[in-house]
Image: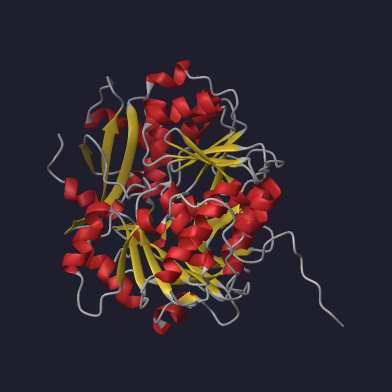
Amino acid sequence: MVAGRNTVFPETLDYLPQTARVWGAKPALHFEGQSTSYADLDLRVRLGALRLAGLG
Amino acid sequence: MRPGKCVVLCAENSPDWIVSYFSVLRLGAVIAPVNLMLTAEEIDYVARDCAAQAVITGGEKAARLRENFSDAAPLILDVKVAGAAKEAAGDVALESAGRSPHDLSTVCYTSGTTGHPKGAMLSHRAVLMNAAMTALTHGRTKDDVTVSALPLSHVYGNIVMHSTFLSGGALSLHRRFDTAAILEDIAVKRATMLEGVPTMYHYLLADPAIERTDTSSLRRCTVGGQGMPVNKMEEVQEKLGCRLLELWGMTEIAGLGSTHPMLAPPRLGSIGAPLPFTEMAVRSLDNPSLEAPRGEIGELVVRGPTVMMGYLGKEEATAEVLEPDGWLKTGDLAKRDEDGFFQIVDRKKDMILTAGFNIYPAEIERVISEHPAVAIVAVAGVPDEAKGELAKAYIVLKAGASANAEEIDAHCRAHLAAYKRPRLFQFVADLPKTSSGKVMRRRLRELDGSGR
């Protein structure tokens, strides 16, 4: 038997890829006159993670 | 960065904070968000306690940490570096670290009113479940625009962020609380939701601009972190034109334990009912193995999937609050009504013992705040040779209002039993507050002699 898991609703806090797929260009964040979409937020997180992975 | 190892995040609210937070989680590492107000020595303690592999911080704090950090220092990273700018175009491939829902996601440090702060260990499931159930209970949708100045490092601000993102809504984040900026944001962004602690609402009510701000887009607001007098909540509802949903929570349960569902009838003065999948009960103070009868004061306990795994490296402290069958002792005194709604009476440790009577600062604060000249009030116990402790009220008056101690005392005489009345009153310009805006009762005594 192959167990199935919910592939839409996230099960860990690393869920931005899922929300970015669903909401894409929709604004996720407004801050001091700047808006960031879900897709851009996820891209920034990927870049941030790559930078952190390369440190130390 | 290694999966499963801690990274401390200490920075003010910004997109960089959010990017750093999720970047750490993307790598499968554990995030330890800490209060920006912590000193270099305190961050040093936290970083050692969780064996941090890095501390992400910003500006002057980064420089001070590099100077002050003790031996075996972790990497000190600037939040602007970790929160990478969007300078790279195209797709950036990065494999998921593959954590499971039961893995440790967060070490969340408690305020540490005495001694060192304790790190509550929270699983991915605990934080995610809390955010999802909060979003569900408050009826969040993709159309919501939520205004928040709550610190993202605080469990309340953190859950606001997650429940917004999980619903596909937009978070209008503020670096810090400023009444004019918050009111303008509500009007300009057509915000549907505002979240805050009682102090923030007290300041909003005291700002005349609230009268001329268009808040008609708001569908509901939330308030938590501390109790708020019912008359003030009614005033908020009237001025903002929407429901104010009370909530109760704590670091050790990753956020909320109870709140009011949007669909349920209003019941101001109650913290509502438990989140789905969460159990709450009130234990008898005389016999903690028994549940207190309905309507009687006891200690609030909570159990469910959001409860922490324990305090990091502190088995004894964990055993003091977390029972083998999963019940967490909250330290809050509460009662439960016939309909299953809970009401917080006070923090167990804030209770004042005067001449053998237990009195609760929150009850006195509720009464004094009903005086028309009072903006904010906080009550604490002060030592007294004859009675053990006396209640003292620290009062901030509304701008342009006047009242003296005799008038406030007369108001208390009319509404409080004699033994509950404060015996000392001090008028002050402001009250000491935490970074999340909550009044710090333990620091009230520092005001002694400063007012009139």
Q: Which x, y percent locates residue B342? A: 59, 53
Q: Is residue B192 left or right of residue B400?
A: right
Instruction: Choose between B75 and B325: the one closer to the eye.
Output: B75
Instruction: Choose between A48 and B71: the one closer to the eye.
Output: A48
Q: Is residue B67 left or right of residue B395?
A: left
Report the number of discs.
0
Give above or below for B297 relative to B168: below
Quarter of the image where the C terminus of chain B is located: top left
In terms of image quadrants, where is residue B312? bottom left
Residue at position x 19%, y 58% from top? Answer: B386
Instruction: Choose between B170 and B37: the one closer to the eye.
Output: B170
Quick one: which residue is furthest to the left in this view? B449
Q: Which x, y percent locates residue A23? A: 67, 46
Residue at position x 38%, y 30% from top? Answer: B179
Q: Which x, y percent locates residue A7? A: 75, 64
Can residue B252 be seen from the camera position used here? no
Can residue B144 be seen from the camera position used here? yes
Instruction: Choose between B284 and B7: the one closer to the eye.
Output: B7
Residue at position x 25%, y 80% from top? Answer: B72
Give above or below for B189 relative to B228: above
Quarter of the image where the N terminus of chain B is located: bottom left
